[in-house]
Amino acid sequence: MGNEVIRPKILVFSTDKISDPGIDQAGLRKIHYSPSVYVISIPCSSGIKTRWIMHAFEQGFDGVFIAADGHECSYSPRCSEHTNKIITDSQTLMKEKNISPKRIRMAAICSVCAEPFANHMENFGRILSEIANNEDEANSRIKS
Amino acid sequence: MKERIGVYICHCGGNISDYVDVEELSSMMKDENGVVIAKHVMFACADSNQKEMINDIREKNLDSIVVASCSPKLHLHTFRGVAERAGLNPFNYVQVNIREQCSWPHSDQPLDATKKAVGLIRAGIKRVANSKALENTEIEATKAVVVVGAGVSGMRAAIDLARMGNEVFLIEKDFFVGGRTAQSDVLFMTNQNGKQLVELLYNEIRSLKNITLFTGAALEKISGSLGNFNIVIKINPRFIHDKADEKLLNQSISECTVEVPDQFNYGLTNRKAIYKNYPEALPDKFVVDAKALQNEKAFIEKYSSCIDIYQAAETLTLTAGSILVTTGADTYQPKENEYGYKKLDGVITLPEFKRFIELNPGKLIYNNKTIRSVAFIYCVENRQTKGENKYCSRFCCTSAIHTSLLINEKYKNIKSYHLFRDIRTYGKQEILYEKSSKQGDIYLRFEEKEPPIVEKQGEKLIVKVKDYLTSKKEIEFETDLVVLVTGMVSRSDSNTISEKLKIPIGNDKFFNEIHPKLKPVETVIKGVFIGGSCQGPKNISESVQSSLSAAAKINALIKSGKISVDPIVAIVDTNICVWCGKCTEVCEYDALKEIKADVKNVASVNKASCTGCGICAPVCPVDAIQVAQYTNNEIEGMIDGFMQKIEMKEKSVETKVEEKEGIVTMKEYPQIWKQILLSIDEKPKTIPEISKELEINNDLITYHLMTMNKYNIVESAGMDKKETYYLYKLKN
């Protein structure tokens, strides 16, 4: 199948009413982003469980991105607060397993955020590659 | 676990198959655990394919299906319907988005798009394998609706709801109906009188026996849920005895000397302590301002048979299946000295000016000065880049222009200056802008960063503005009146209403609908709808449109007396739950309650209130809560599906065309191109010939041949014998 390009695998949790239409619009407008981005649609970012995030890392995802509704969340005015707590709890577990807390990110993606979503994916991919390079370097130093 | 899964992969014409190798996908999916059948189809949503799916489900005894096609936003319900018609539970169906989230965004990398599609479909298969059959819950619904707010939107919606056979309770906080429309003398576009419009609606409400109107009434407490809300209202007294002698009451009004600023006229005039908003205000009943009269003991004593300032408020509990909120909006009140407001004589707001015009039928005289010129300053505290009100209020440009036309018609020879940022007289309202331009109104454009300056020079009111229409030339002129065109803001009591009904409030502080396009009048609170300007700035027509839309939705919901509730709600595993109360702390909808189980207390979900948001699930310390369709097995199964190793097979059919490497690498071709190339490999063919051979319609073949021609892959080889069609051949 030819030479494979190694790209960080990103799991996106996206909200079905607000963020999903934004991500769909990126596709509709043929705005390109990495094909190693996979999206799981959920009702609200405050409903994401830390175990799902940890499961994604255990299965080999390089990063988890939460496309949240932010202040536009129609379920709870405290949505950002709840989602932040989920991220903080996950980062604690990630540190325990030597996973860089930078491997999880959150941003508000609204129903017209096609370009911002593609930009977020590009930036996050770059950050994840840098983390991987630094980790490889550190590992090789330990070995030597 | 589902063990007889059907997988359907859609070409979507060429929208998917141009970039994703759907044939390869379907052959790979046949080997997945539990998959009984895997097919690729030209259009999954086509009637013929739906029928084929139904046959497959029945013949092969499928227990679940996966359709990999477009976004679930488009066809989730189509395929749930297919499943249901074939006798499957509609929730044992999963739609995988391989178009908007795969073939289109990765059209630049078709090979990787195909690999991604493998992961996406495998995730769908794992999800459907873990899916549970779900049934909608049916609840009894009271065929009654509470409409909060008797402005034009609320009144109009109440009438329609009543006509459709529902019991309607219309609640108005003020003692008179009509809201802001009653404050308008002439309405734009129709030139109808606002008060007459209110009267028309009020008379219709009176004629309908199934509408009960409560004025001076406010929401106190809401309990219950969709189908059966219990709404406690507080009805404030008018402080006038029900059986007061009309003659004596009229005498008391003429003798009453206590006056207070009239809020209906924005304090431009005073009103008596026994009052109506305006002479024809409805209901045709006076109200006593008890606070203003509290020191008038002799007067109260004299008219004690009519007036009782000690009357107490009443509370009443109403039961309704649904609630419609049409509480309207406020207009922005400028800060002191904003453009000289409340500091400089001659600076007023547009709503104040409109009341002022109505109160001055003969001459336009303000503070003993005849008005000959008016400067309208637009977008006051609206469309702010840095401020709170970033939105446009929509109605105010038209309202200001309509007012300038009105004053010229009513008082003659009044010069109007319009200091605007952009004129937004959309739709038919543009006619008013044209009329205003023709009557000689002067339009000066300013930018937000350089707003006009209003100042006094001696007795003169001076306006200075940098006009962007004339190369930022500084223009200074004298005017008799400055009118601040203020926009809409959310009501000052919207937070109180939001807290009681749990309606979310947006950044703009208006009530939030679920989705502005797809669910514009629904809120996340099941059974609670919004209409009119409480959800954002709207003119009267738009407000009525939205409230009528909500009325239709409500009627459809409760008309049968039974409501089918979506089964996607939180589920508590009572074996694990040890009741800590954390779930109730985060639930915005009171959907979780503590109940007694056999030997312990556990959480219980009210399905009618639960929105399925899942906020309660991550806070549970023992992981006892899951949301249907988003269970741990389903989500973690999807993650496993994404990450499963991909081994793609080489395709035998590709061997022949791959030899033509000189043109382009064949593997990078969309699937349909490969088929066309194979078809014209032997000899040139026309579009109908290719179409017939490949069983793909003419238009699609034409489109792709044109693209292939553009990329120098095929070329025309003269005409056919009938000289009707070009013949297409491979480019050598």
Image (cartoon, coloured by chain):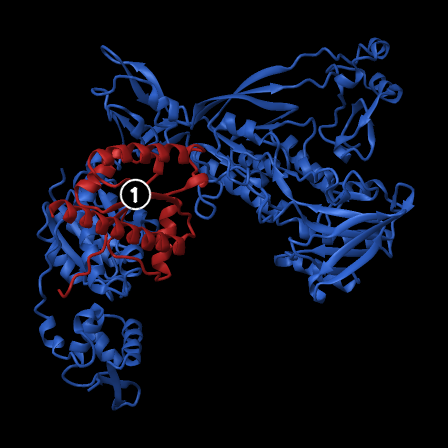
Relative height, residue B680 to residue B474 (above, below) = below
User: Is B680 or B243 nearer to us in this picture?
Assistant: B680
Name the residue at 24% across, 26% down.
B623
Image colour for chain B is: blue
Residue at the far front: name it. Answer: A144
User: Is B89 or B175 nearer to us in this picture?
Assistant: B175
| Residue B184 horizontal/vertical position (percent) | 73, 42
| Residue B326 horizontal/vertical position (percent) | 57, 35
Residue topped by disc 1: A102
| Residue B177 horizontal/vertical position (percent) | 68, 32
Q: Chain of mark 1?
A: A
Within-10-Å neighbours for mark 1: few <14, some 14–19, many 20+ = some
Image colour for chain A is: red
Name the residue at 24% across, 25% down.
B624
Q: Is residue B267 left or right of residue B503?
A: right
Q: Is residue A128 left or right of residue A114?
A: left
Residue type at numbered disc 1: Lys
Q: Is residue B611 left or right of residue B353?
A: left
